[in-house]
Amino acid sequence: MSIAATRKSDEVGRKLTALYAPIAADLVEAEKVFNAELASRYPFVQTLVDHCADFRGKRLRPALVFLTARASGEVKPDHAVLAAVVEMIHTATLVHDDILDESMIRRHAATVNAEWGNEAAVLMGDYLFTHAFHLAASLETTLACRWIGHATNLVCEGEMQQVSNRGNFDLDEESYFSIIRGKTAELTAVSCRLGAHYAGAPQATVRSMEEYGRDLGVAFQIADDVLDLWGEERATGKSLGTDLEKQKLTLPLIRLLETSDPETAASLRNLLAEAKPEDRPRVRDLLDQSEALQYAWGQAEHYAEKAAAALDVLPDSPSKSVLRTLTRYVVHRSH
Amino acid sequence: MSIAATRKSDEVGRKLTALYAPIAADLVEAEKVFNAELASRYPFVQTLVDHCADFRGKRLRPALVFLTARASGEVKPDHAVLAAVVEMIHTATLVHDDILDESMIRRHAATVNAEWGNEAAVLMGDYLFTHAFHLAASLETTLACRWIGHATNLVCEGEMQQVSNRGNFDLDEESYFSIIRGKTAELTAVSCRLGAHYAGAPQATVRSMEEYGRDLGVAFQIADDVLDLWGEERATGKSLGTDLEKQKLTLPLIRLLETSDPETAASLRNLLAEAKPEDRPRVRDLLDQSEALQYAWGQAEHYAEKAAAALDVLPDSPSKSVLRTLTRYVVHRSH
């Protein structure tokens, strides 16, 4: 890990720590629940658990649970459990995603698959999933289990749709949005829904918070996909260009294909189908000469604004203001 | 798939269908719940769901739910849900196990990883896990979610212990039993515990049923491990010798190493460490010249008998008699 990367990472950490000030103590509680649930008497398992803790950089989903709770009602002990649950599920999907993407770096640390092999990574993801559900079942009713179960079903479907569309260079925008709504936005949506519901917010507010979370997730994923094409590994802390390598069509390229003349589109499809690393600059050039990146950023902005608008139902509060800042952060973060 | 394999498979199917006669209608109900829960509007997902249905040959865990229920109380609509849940979790572990083992065949069909790649297999396993928990959460209380969550936590730990002991040729019996109690026996134990509890059986009976399920699972796994060393692919319907190939020490080899003279043990450790397919006959010879296979069968018999003894709390009934037959079946099955 380079010094520049460390500094960048520290900077993002500091920024988020400052942003999360209204829920700092809440996040500490969630962290305790998270660690207690995952603790294992087997040293190998504990090593993997400790390692995965390093992936949990942004803590976006637990933050959403607490922020929506504080902004719409009262934080209760159940919220720490819910926050730990959604973070566990998110971490599980990261660990499994890294296998799918054959990624080697995640938040400046080696991925589980890179360090201990795919087998350990498959099982570690499973361990995180089953503990998440076990923990959710410690609540009084089945409600959280049902909502989280439903959301994770849709997360998996989104991911499977994505895999089945590898190498499909005719993927359209509608299918792209359907994929990212499943794989990313369901979990941010349910985090907000749970946060507000368990805080005792009225049903209409719970629905608005869910919409906020969904649109925030969509904005976040579009930005993430743009950064994968256009970011720097140093700054993002993960392997980049994996979408191109894996022939995964994301919004900028879908737009570029849709708006190019037939000849350029055909030549781009060839480049994408061959997926040679040395062709990446050529793909970048085509993107640069088009408005496709701007279009994708515009879509990210659009969903971020929709998310911000969903906050209008809330009275002013420090947590509401953080929720609003997050809508800008997910689009404008440099990682 | 060879004709001999088909015949063998049909024969096993017929035998089990006859055995499950007292719960035939129950299993049909569970099947309906299973299919309804997993149905997907995405053709790719549905194809994988349909494919995995072919793996569910023995239906041992759903059968245990219903048999313990009928033998100890009354079958209720919840039982079909519970049976579908445990079968989903079992199927999830099979799909993920096949990635770990790089297996190509499962119940005479291609594994998900062989047919659609590791990515699809990782996600399909996740899909089965999350749907299992979602389905469990449709019950009135969190009890099933808690019990199933706890059991699957231990299943994952057992699997991880196993992976961390790959290539450890000093693995002792105690650790072996700890691994198989986790990875196999927890799920059969919880199937029986749930079956009896939801049938309204008294607590002592529920505990006995759990013990039955645990011992049955241990017996089953020992037999499975012996067959992996000593069976025929044609008859078992899965890739064999994978334990040797994966340097996974199982009971017969642990026993052989413990009872061999130091020289033989050292030469065996070398053979195991190199894991060449052409050395397999040599390993088989060493096993044949020892009492290690008999010892392992003896242990399987011992646990099967313990399981049978746990049934003494039950009044006589057709279902009790099937539970008793299963203790013999898991050891003496030819697959």
Image (spheres, coloured by chain):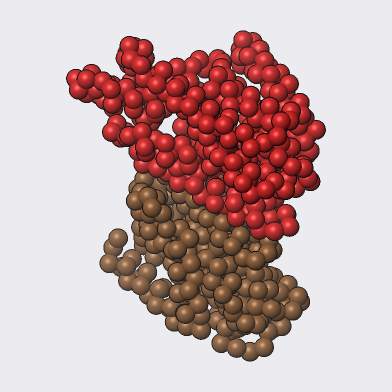
Chain colours: A brown, B red
The residue drawn where x is 36% and y is 12% is B288
The residue drawn where x is 36% and y is 33% is B173
Most foreground residue, B307 or B26:
B307
In the image: residue B200, left or right of residue B60 = right
The residue drawn where x is 64% and y is 49% is B203
Whether residue A233 is visible: no
The residue drawn where x is 71% and y is 83% is A313
Most foreground residue, A76 or A170:
A76
Q: Is residue A64 above or below residue A149?
A: below
Q: Is residue B60 above or below residue A45?
A: above
Whether residue B135 is visible: yes
Q: Residue B26 placed where, x, y %?
A: 77, 36
Residue B205 found in image quarter: top right
Most foreground residue, B297 or A332:
B297
Q: Residue furthest left?
A: B263
Q: Residue A117 placed where, x, y %?
A: 39, 43
Q: Is residue A51 above or below residue A328?
A: above
For the C terminus of chain A, the quadrant is bottom left
Q: Residue B78 placed where, x, y %?
A: 75, 47
